[in-house]
Image (spheres, rainbow, N blue to C red):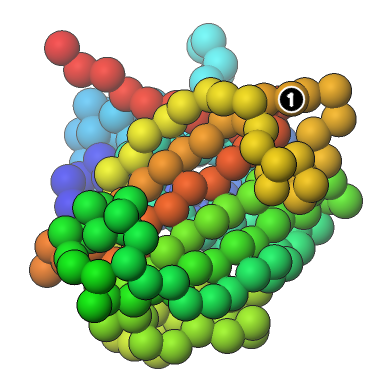
Amino acid sequence: MSKYQTVYEDIKEKIITGVFPANQELLSENELMHHYHFSKDTIRKALSLLERDGYIRKQQGRNSVVLEPQLTKPQSLSALKTVGELNHPHTHDVKTELTSLYIVQGEALLMEAFQVDDSVDFYRVGRSRTINGECVEYEISYFDRRIVPYLNRDIVEGSIYRYLEQELDLTISHSQREISFRYANEEEGKSLDLGDYDMVVVVTSTSYLDDGRPFQYGSISYRPDKITFTSTAKR
């Protein structure tokens, strides 16, 4: 991990846990330099990432201000986080409900995504997520049962990733994502509180372990006004 990423992660954790309270000024750049023993350029890179990800707001001629933790703040496309991790301060009422859990086999889409034949089967997991009383996310995920041999309601409604990492001792590496906008299908229309919207934002992804094996394929559908993504482009 680079120096500025180390500073970023440490300050972020302090904001999330309340060591640096919301709506108060962060330490000055000079104070952060002395605290971390890094250069001003390193500190400024870390602060830029913190502002990009919605943890602080820079002020001209003054110290940065720590922002109130928000579950619906812009999510970085480069971060692979669970909802529980995004809601670590528990500032929102988040409920995950299992809508379906069964085994499928021989589906062409999955055989192509995982590069397997029809002898491999998968868990199909349907979950809806309610945030502060509104159902604004609907997820369909498929897990390779050679890697994830067992799932139940408690695991699915808790944290699948925590189960994979802590119970199965798997190391999750990265995810390849595609974002699209389309009309809501019947399943999404019944599950989501879409209000006046008839479209959804869909993030389709394939997730991999550190040894390169794909273990999950699926999509999360969002109500359009409840999700924002951020990304950093370099030339």
**Residue at 47% in and 27% down:** 180
Q: Which quadrant of the structure image shows residue 31? A: top left
Residue furthest left in the image: 211
Q: What amino acid is at disc 1?
A: Asp
Number of other residues with Cα within 10 Å of mark 1, as a class: few under 14, some 14 to 19, many 20 or more: some
Q: Position of residue 6 (x, y in %)?
A: 28, 51
**Residue at 37% in and 26% down:** 231
Residue 157 vs residue 4: left or right? right
Compared with 175, 57 (above or below) is above
Q: Which quadrant of the structure image shows residue 154? A: bottom right
Residue designated by label 1: 198
Q: Position of residue 122 (x, y in %)?
A: 38, 73
Q: Position of residue 4 (x, y in %)?
A: 25, 40
Q: Nearer the viewer, residue 100 or 178?
A: 100
Compared with 33, 234 (above or below) is above
- Classify the position of the C terminus by image quarter: top left
**Residue at 32% in and 24% down:** 232
Q: Position of residue 107 (x, y in %)?
A: 35, 60
Whether residue 109 is visible to the viewer of this picture, yes or no, is: yes
**Residue at 66% in and 33% down:** 184
